[in-house]
Amino acid sequence: MQSSEDVVRRFIERINDHDVVRIIDMCTTEHRFVDSLGQILSGREQLRRAWSGYLELFPDYRIEAETLISAGGSVLVAGHASATAKLRSSQAPWRIPAAWRAEVEADLVDLWQVYADNKPVYELIAHDG
């Protein structure tokens, strides 16, 4: 059995590798993804579509984990998220401070919650429309 922190580090590696199949493989069957607006996704097919769509829009999306703090199965991550938005008229890079909360059960991620001010990202997308 791995430490919760090690599981989260491996999960982040898979996100940074943009490997949707391996991202989903690390999720429990009851996994919940909570975005920065509080919207909840669950179910492997819904997660697969969401990750695939997100990584298509942001093909170089990356999590830079600077600090990890764990207690039992809970892990908090602080750092930055960055990517280049693949827009119709241009490509627009962004980098924002972000935090993530994970709940780990039996070496799988049961919860992945994002905390970030995505306003700069939304503005980039809005200016393309």
Image: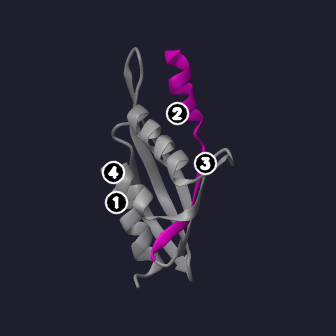
Task: Residue 13: give its label.
Answer: 1
List x then y, in percent, for residue 72: 56, 83
**Which residue lies at the image location 42% right of the left edge and 32% below the top edge?**
57
- Residue 14 shows up from this direction: yes
List x then y, in percent, for residue 95: 44, 42
Is 39 left or right of 53, judged from the image as shown?
Answer: right
User: Which residue lies most toward the right here?
Assistant: 38
- Distance, label 4 to label 2, CA atoms, is 22 Å
**Which residue lies at the image location 38% right of the left edge and 43% below the top edge?**
61
Give whichever of 118, 15 is nearer the camera: 15
List x then y, in percent, for residue 76: 55, 68
- Mark 1 is on which residue type? Glu
SS at badge 4 = loop
Magenta stretch: residue 92 in it? no
Bounds of the magenta span?
107-129
SS at badge 3 = loop
- Distance, label 1 to label 4, CA atoms, is 9 Å
Which tag is nearer the camera, tag 2 or tag 1? 1
- Distance, label 1 to label 3, CA atoms, is 19 Å
